[in-house]
Image (cartoon, grey):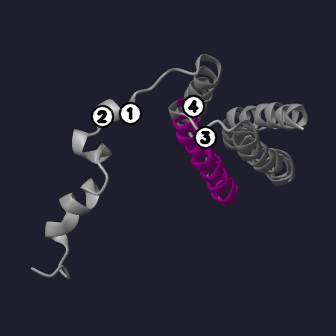
Amino acid sequence: MIVWLKIIHISTVAVWMAGLVSLPGLYVQRAHVVDKDALYRLQRMVRFVYVAMISPAAFLAVGSGIGLIFAREVFTPWMAAKLALVGALVVAHTLAGLVIIRLFGEGEVYPVWRFLVATGLVMALMAGVLFLVLAKPDFDFAALLPESMSEPGALKRILEPLNPWATP
């Protein structure tokens, strides 16, 4: 079971991330298309890639990843950091969909600087995920928290003066 989950996860992550890297390159082509038919073909292709390929891959990647977390019981700090980066990839995915909605309106273009920023950001997130998965670094988040945060009942004691309904 775990082997099949890993196969699904790795293959869908590859499709998802490759799609997120390639989409800005397709967006840039919008500036060079002036013919209405060519513009319509580009729009159809971009929407097809996003809706029929990248989005299902993202859904399966996240779903199989969640399955792997529970199957392998990977509840470690590096996994929390990886999930934060995956969350940023989900935001990038959503923003890519919003760009598609607006990009093919009359007079819209996708500037080259935005292509460079979007591609660089997605590649940096991908590299971060890959690093965390392969290195599995030992994070010590306890060192960042005050000592009182590890005591039972400390949060209640800290926040009690802020409670307007507390009895004096």
The residue positioned 38% from the left and 33% from the top of the image is 141
- Mark 1 and mark 3: Cα distance apart in space: 19 Å
Figure label count: 4
- Residue type at mark 4 is Leu
Nearest the eye: 57 or 159: 159
**Residue 117 can be seen in this image:** yes
Q: Secondary structure at mark 2?
A: helix
- Mark 4 and mark 2: Cα distance apart in space: 23 Å
In primary-sequence order, the first of circles 3 and 4 is: 3
The magenta span reads: 78-106
Instruction: Report x, y in % for residue 12.
Output: 82, 37
Residue 57 drawn above or below residue 163: above
Question: Which disc number belongs to residue 144?
Answer: 2
State the residue position of label 4. Answer: 125
Question: Which disc number belongs to residue 86?
Answer: 3
- Mark 1 and mark 2: Cα distance apart in space: 5 Å
Question: Quarter of the image containing the C terminus?
Answer: bottom left
Question: Which disc number belongs to residue 141?
Answer: 1
Mark 1 touches mark 2? (CB < 8 Å): yes
